[in-house]
Amino acid sequence: MSNNIVRGTVLLSGAAFLSKILGMIYVIPFNEIVGEQGGALFQYAYNPYNILISLSTVGVPLAVSKFVSKYNSLGDYQTSMRMFRSGLLLMAITGILAFLTLFFSAEWIAKQIIVDDNKMGNSIEDVTMVIQMVSFALLIIPSMSIVRGFFQGHQSMGPTAVSQIAEQIVRIVFLLVAVFLIIEVVDGPMPLAVGFATFATFIGAIASSVVLWVYWRKRKPYIERSLMQQQYTHDISTKEMFIELFRYAGPFVMVGIATPLYQLVDQFTFHRGMMAIGELDISEIAFATINFYGHKLVIIPVTIATGLSLAILPALTDTFTQNRKELLFKQINQALQIISVLVIPAAVGLAALSYPAYGALYGMNHIALTGSLLAWYAPIALILALFTVTSSILQGINQQHFAVISLLAGLFVKILFNIPLIHLFGAKGAIFGTALASGTAVVLNLWRIKKSIHFSYRQTFKRTLLVLIFSAIMFIAIVATKFLFGMLLPYEESRTAAVIMLMIGVSVGGVVYLWLGYASTLLERVLGNRVRILDKVFRR
């Protein structure tokens, strides 16, 4: 059983990570074809879509998995099948409702975003069209999430992993081919190309559904055999089933839509703030940098660190239930320290190399603006990672409902301060607004953890202080490297030079931080035997 759990965890984590990497790589050629204006238009469609898809599906696969696993373990396969069939029907209905909501509100949303058709590159008609095209995916994805959860409940993680990867690959191939054909081959309009890029989500969902259907055909005889052998079934009504399902799924929903909600606030307020300070001409470039292109870079260390950190949390729930406080504190410390050790240096390094990083991946257009914004946005990685992990810790210690309160508090701060901060600091104000909002949520989560189980942050604080010192030394090393090589490499003017500078900077920064962490035994204390691989590089 434990081998199955480990194998399943590796499959799902690997698939999620590969999907994230693919999701970042395709943005490079996409940006090459449609530019910042196209990226902004793409994100206008995806922000409201992400919120609706999160409300429709986030937590559902896990909740269904938990439900099915519970009743299967009791030998009640019939109740599991009832949940599956009822859940499919429910998700089909919520998918249709979500589709209709997004499709018919597209023009209203577009009018809230585009404040001046003449000064902004994208028009209300363009935004309406791309939102309507992405909305079709809502017809399929909610039902698909139920099927994935059903397989997971049967301890079968392969269908979810394979369907996720198939969905992402087909989506990206369709997206890039469609955009290339429309713009480069037939010389069509950029908004139409971006519309088809958003429609690719629907095509990817179809591919995923086909994969799941193939798996279903293979597994169906085994499931039917289990049903025929069943001797007892629980007398549980459909209403009670759904109450249990949503009790499992509820806490995940609010945590899952945190970042899309912050981005939606930007979507409705950013251009108004920029117009008020007379910078509407660069507004869409800045918006695309912060909410789309830059975000893709910032989220990479967050994904890696939270993946490692969250692996600890299932055990944390069991430890809390058994009231083993010493082990519980150790597990929480380790989860938080993994975030510090991995995300802080990554954020500092990205800030130090923001110009060559953005230039190497997305080109040198407007690099003075885009490089500067990425440098300011990089530290947000730490706050986003901490919010995800602290919210999960709250769930592990049975305080999951407080995560909703902290998120709402953060959202209120974002709504309240976003435009005033843009007035004061220009485009950077939106970044400061996100930092203030998500920082508020993190502080509240940390306070709740401390208060509810009398947890001490002393050890985490000491090790984080050490990480900050090592990251500062790494930052100085990168800046010195940029200064020396910058005399030969015009990395703010040439993309080739930016690529070379990025590789040199990452190598220098990585070696400096890893050596400091290895020599001080910090990495070994936090990550355990995982760092033994460095023995071959840094022999004591």
Image (cartoon, helix red, strand yellow):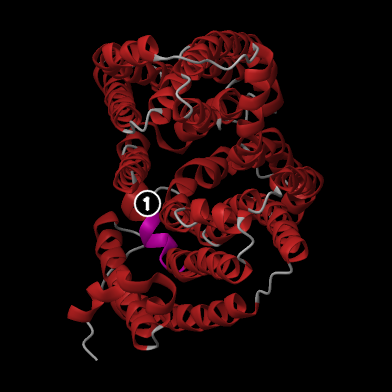
Q: Residue at x 53, y 65 (%)?
A: 331
The x and y percentages for residue 95 are: 56, 13
- Identify the main secondary structure in magenta: helix
Residue at the spot of label 1? 364
**Segment tinted magenta in the rendering:** 352-358
Quadrant position of residue 210: top left
Q: Quick one: 255 or 492, which is closer to the camera?
A: 255
- Callout 1: few (<14), some (14-19), or many (20+) C-alpha neighbours within 10 Å? many
**In the visual, does 62 lie left or right of 7?**
right
| Above or below, 296 relative to 252 | below
Residue 47 lies in what quarter of the image?
Answer: top right
What is the x, y in percent for residue 423?
76, 51
441 within the magenta span: no
How many marks can you see? 1
Tell me, yes or no, if residue 122 can be seen here.
no
Q: Locate the C terminus by quadrant.
A: bottom left
